[in-house]
Image (cartoon, helix red, strand yellow):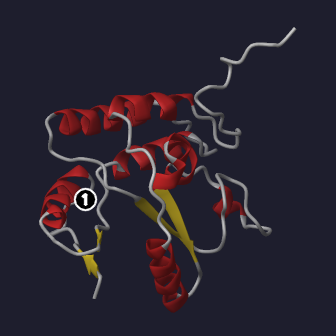
């Protein structure tokens, strides 16, 4: 009763699907409104693809194109980032590329949401992990009930700057790292 799902209309995806779905969601007065459409989906896919080892090397060109499209739509006030990103996974992954248990190689792929996006605002990216649909629903409801407050998202320009500087598998540092001085 407290959770409403707003699905994108039609066959659109990416920004075209997310913008109207997020607008519809903003008019709903429920404690939790889930929107399975993400305005950053294409950016996330291209960022992850940059790190895949394949016979066809991919540079950052496609990522930059998708980031530019998202940034233009964001600057035109077509969308705001959602309050939280709730990532559904099959299994447990507490942090980017660090499985709690032995994982299959496909589980070790760089993940835009659990990596660079989570490094920007850790409290704004939550993970619901389970393998069965019923367990996923229970994990999702559990995560919704335990969302923590924190600072709002920075500008999309700042997020993309952090994404460009994020290396999968690297430990994330605080924004104050490197500003410390040695005591003598």
Q: Position of residue 154 (x, y in %)?
A: 38, 36
Residue 120 appears in the figure: yes
Nearest the viewer among 142 and 38 is 142
Residue 106, given in percent of the width and then of the height, sits at 65, 62
Q: Residue at x 47, y 65 (%)?
A: 147
Q: How many marks?
A: 1
Near-viewer residue (50 or 23): 23
Across and down, in percent, residue 100 comes to 76, 66
Q: Toward which corner of the image does residue 95 lie, by quadrant? A: bottom right
| Pointer 1 residue | 13
Would residue 59 be seen by someone viewing this image from the given angle?
Answer: no
Quarter occupied by the C terminus: top right
Residue 139, relative to residue 39: is it above or below? below
Image coordinates of residue 48 in percent, x first then y, are 52, 47
Q: Considering the image in quadrants, where does the N terminus appear?
A: bottom left
Relative height, residue 125 to residue 61 (above, below) = below
Q: Quadrant of residue 129?
A: bottom right
- The residue depicted at 24 percent of the width and 47 percent of the height is 80
Q: Is residue 69 above or below residue 138?
A: above
Horizontal side of 116 relative to 68 (left or right) equals: right
> Which residue is at 57% across, 47% downward?
115
Outermost residue toward the right? 184
* Residue sitting at x 38%, y 30%: 64
Depth check, front residue: 9 or 85: 85
């Amino acid at each position: 009763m407290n959770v409403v799902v707003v699905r994108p209309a039609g066959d659109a995806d990416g920004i075209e699907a997310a913008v109207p779905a997020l607008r519809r969601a903003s008019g709903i007065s429920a404690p939790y409104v889930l929107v399975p459409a993400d305005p950053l989906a294409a950016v996330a896919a291209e960022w992850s693809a940059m790190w895949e080892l394949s016979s066809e090397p991919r540079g950052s060109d496609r990522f930059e194109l998708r980031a530019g499209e998202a940034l233009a739509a964001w600057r035109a006030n077509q969308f705001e980032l959602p309050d939280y990103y709730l990532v559904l996974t099959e299994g447990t992954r507490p942090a980017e590329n660090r499985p709690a248990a032995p994982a299959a190689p496909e589980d070790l792929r760089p993940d835009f949401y659990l990596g660079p996006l989570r490094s920007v605002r850790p409290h704004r990216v939550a993970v619901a992990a389970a393998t069965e649909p019923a367990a996923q629903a229970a994990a999702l409801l559990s995560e919704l009930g335990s969302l923590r407050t924190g600072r709002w998202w920075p500008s999309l320009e700042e997020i993309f700057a952090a994404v460009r500087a994020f290396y999968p598998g690297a430990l994330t540092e605080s924004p104050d790292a490197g500003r410390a001085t040695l005591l003598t």
